[in-house]
């Protein structure tokens, strides 16, 4: 069994383009892997909190092995597929899970002979990106018929595993093990006490609640009736004995998911017996836990359904849950039942005339539920095997399904996974006419993020007149992002790598924004700019001390001159005036460069003396060529000592 598992910052009025405003949605699909000779199937997928995706699938028909590939959220490239099972061995029934640190665990059945099998596992270390050698989880070489392997990860990183041994004809047993840490081995497996050594144990699955409690379910033949059984980890740390769930007579296809309050939701197909309308079938569900003493409720009961199949259960961080299944009557509709914390709402998901089979169910970070299903109509040309995803927004209903197949039929085993930001992926296999392929489609559900370690680089300090290098690499798993900057001094820029030169000392707030079609994300950094020392003066090469002044006082950038000039006052003036003026009138190579500006003035202290600092921007009538190294700016005003200042070019 498988668990398949940046607000827009205004730079200037039009400096930062607004996003296109597109809603989150599915992107065109592409191939992850292909083969002209080997069947690619049995796929599973997970995505970590940062949006990195790991897919695992079965490769081959004569000696199937497990293949894995990881797609980077930064580079958007899939890694070269690698074999993670033992070379030349049969590896089947794979399941994968990921912990909070991004470490991926895979679990599978390793066949020894037709009658013997063992359980193996491998781990992809998030820090190195490498897979470990496969390790046995069980401690026996005599297991037969291993099947229905499943994994679940606790918040502390503990990985729990469950599987069944024995063929469906019996006897069969339910086994558990756990791996406490990434570096530790698996604990010795143990059989759940009171598991009947009888035929027809089937469908084991495990879930872990936020409090770390693990809960497992399966169906077992008890006194001639298939019943849902459960076991859970007690407060003391050991597993409980197996017990029947109330009202689970004649059950099959049980599924379970954990809720944030420590409860669990379990659902199963009820198969009618002699006392319950023979031949009818419906779905039952119960929310309780962990002992599960509450009575289950009927979901979508109908007297005409011949069987309820393909069940999946999922939950979100708010305590909502969804169950989906195929109702095998009236066109084989895909049905969903949504739990809102107090009641169930039933809805047909597949459109009228579209027979469908659910293949996975998952929630995204915002609480939207997604059902992957495959259309199975044989009477509509070109439609069998088309992969669809139906989505229900929070508080809404399932809308028009998205067709991920791009016209290709015969898709199979579509699996879903979503990261902590709301981005997701669907992976399925496609047996084409000339090749076998693993296909994937991304779900762009969140704007770019600039909050990860190393995503934005802005130095803490800099010097007036010297370029400061900055860079940004947002996490945006399913799209390219445009990068925009505000430097805190009125200047702006764009691009992933950029430099900027500050003209005036001070502390500035640098805002970096990343924008894609879904939205934008931003982050802020602070940089302190120090004045350049006066060459040969006090504090420079000429002697001790740290007397500095703001330089350059006139910075030429394009056709703009940014002024930050300090002037003295006339002897009779008691204070600085409110404004000053600046002007340029230079002729070079037959062209005149001129302009004027009104400057703001404030009182500052330089080297212990009161001075008047003038600031503002002067715009020239034309842009000087690079061959014109500098211009002369005249600065003055009432009660001020006029100065002539040479500009410095901005090379940033």
Image (cartoon, rainbow, N blue to C red):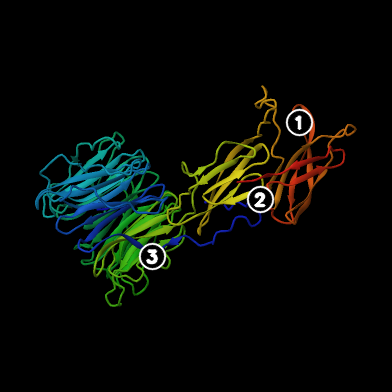
Labels 3 and 2 touching (C-beta < 8 A): no
Neighbor class of circle 1 (other Cα within 10 Å; few <14, some 14-19, many 20+) is few
Q: Which mark is residue 605?
A: 1
Residue furthest top in the image: 544
Instruction: Measure the alpha-carbon separation of dots 1 and 2.
Output: 36 Å
Asked whether residue 74 is in view, the answer is yes
Number of numbered discs overlaid on the protein picture: 3
Image coords of residue 89 (percent x, y):
15, 50
Residue at the spot x=36%, y=46% of the render? 263
Residue 616 lies, with reference to residue 479, above or below; the image says: above
Please report whichever mark, 3 or 1, sits nearer to the chain's N-terminal start: 3
Asked whether residue 202 is in view, the answer is no
Q: Callout 3: helix, strand or loop? A: strand
Instruction: Measure the alpha-carbon separation of dots 3 and 2.
Output: 73 Å
Please report whichever mark, 1 or 2, sits nearer to the chain's N-terminal start: 1
When asked about the image quadrant of residue 348, the answer is bottom left
**Tag 3 residue:** 347
**Is 113 on the left or on the right of 373, as rendered?**
left
Image coords of residue 377 (percent x, y):
29, 73
| Viewer-nearest of discs 3 and 2 | 2
Q: Callout 2: helix, strand or loop? A: loop
Instruction: Measure the alpha-carbon separation of dots 3 and 1.
Output: 74 Å
**Tag 2 residue:** 627
Q: Callout 1: helix, strand or loop? A: strand
Residue 501 lies, with reference to residue 30, above or below; the image says: above
Neighbor class of circle 3 (other Cα within 10 Å; few <14, some 14-19, many 20+) is some
């Amino acid at each position: 069994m498988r668990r398949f598992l940046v607000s827009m910052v205004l730079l200037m009025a039009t400096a930062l383009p607004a996003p296109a405003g597109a809603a989150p949605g599915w992107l065109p699909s592409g191939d992850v892997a292909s083969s002209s000779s080997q069947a690619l199937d049995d796929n599973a997928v997970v995505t970590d909190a940062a949006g990195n995706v790991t897919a695992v699938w079965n490769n081959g028909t004569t000696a199937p092995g497990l293949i894995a590939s990881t797609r980077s959220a930064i580079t958007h490239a899939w890694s070269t597929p690698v074999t993670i099972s033992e070379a030349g061995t049969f590896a089947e029934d794979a399941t994968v899970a990921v912990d909070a640190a991004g470490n991926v665990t895979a679990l599978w059945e390793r066949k020894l002979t037709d009658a013997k099998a063992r359980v193996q596992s491998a781990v992809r270390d998030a820090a190195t990106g490498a897979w470990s050698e496969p390790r046995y989880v069980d401690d026996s070489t005599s297991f037969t018929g291993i099947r229905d392997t499943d994994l679940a990860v606790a918040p502390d990183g503990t990985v729990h595993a469950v599987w069944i041994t024995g063929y469906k004809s019996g006897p069969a047993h339910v086994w558990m093990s756990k791996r406490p840490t990434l570096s530790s081995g698996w604990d010795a497996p143990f059989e759940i006490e009171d598991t009947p050594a009888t035929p027809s144990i089937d469908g084991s699955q495990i879930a872990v609640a936020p409090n770390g409690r693990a809960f497992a379910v399966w169906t077992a033949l008890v006194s001639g009736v298939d019943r849902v059984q459960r076991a859970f980890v007690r407060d003391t740390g050991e597993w409980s004995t197996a017990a029947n769930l109330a009202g689970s007579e004649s059950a099959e296809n049980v599924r379970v998911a954990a809720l944030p309050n420590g409860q669990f939701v379990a659902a199963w197909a009820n198969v009618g017996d002699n006392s319950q309308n023979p031949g009818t079938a419906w779905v039952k569900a119960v929310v309780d836990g962990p002992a599960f003493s509450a009575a289950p409720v009927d979901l979508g009961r109908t007297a005409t359904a011949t069987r309820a199949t393909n069940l999946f259960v999922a939950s979100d961080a708010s305590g909502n849950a969804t169950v989906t299944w195929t109702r095998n009557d009236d066109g084989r509709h895909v049905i969903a039942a949504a739990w809102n914390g107090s009641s169930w709402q039933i809805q047909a998901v597949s459109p009228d005339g579209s027979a469908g089979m659910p293949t996975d169910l998952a929630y995204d970070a915002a609480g939207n539920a997604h059902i992957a299903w495959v259309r199975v109509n044989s009477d509509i040309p070109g439609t069998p095997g088309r992969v669809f995803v139906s989505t229900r927004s929070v508080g809404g209903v399932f809308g028009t399904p998205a067709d991920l197949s791009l016209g290709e039929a015969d898709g199979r085993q579509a699996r879903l996974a979503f990261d902590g930001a709301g981005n997701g992926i669907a992976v399925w296999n496609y047996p084409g006419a000339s090749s076998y392929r693993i296909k994937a489609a991304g779900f762009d559900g969140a704007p770019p993020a600039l909050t990860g370690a190393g995503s934005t680089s802005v130095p803490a300090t800099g010097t007036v007149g010297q370029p400061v290098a900055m860079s940004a690499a947002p996490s945006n798993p399913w799209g390219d992002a445009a990068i925009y900057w505000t430097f805190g001094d009125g200047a702006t820029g764009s691009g992933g790598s950029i430099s900027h030169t500050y003209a005036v000392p001070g502390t500035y707030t640098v805002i970096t924004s990343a924008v894609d079609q879904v939205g934008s994300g931003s982050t802020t950094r602070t940089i302190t700019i120090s004045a350049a020392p006066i060459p040969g003066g006090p504090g420079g090469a000429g002697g001790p001390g740290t007397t500095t002044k703001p330089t350059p006082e006139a910075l030429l950038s394009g056709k703009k001159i940014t002024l930050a000039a300090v002037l003295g006052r006339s002897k009779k003036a008691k204070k600085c005036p409110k404004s000053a003026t600046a002007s340029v009138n230079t002729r070079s190579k037959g062209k005149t460069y001129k302009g004027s500006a009104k400057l703001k003035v404030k009182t500052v202290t330089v080297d212990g003396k009161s001075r008047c600092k003038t600031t503002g921007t002067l715009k020239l009538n034309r842009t000087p060529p690079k061959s014109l190294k500098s211009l002369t700016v005249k600065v003055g005003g009432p009660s001020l000592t006029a100065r002539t200042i040479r500009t410095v070019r901005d090379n940033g």
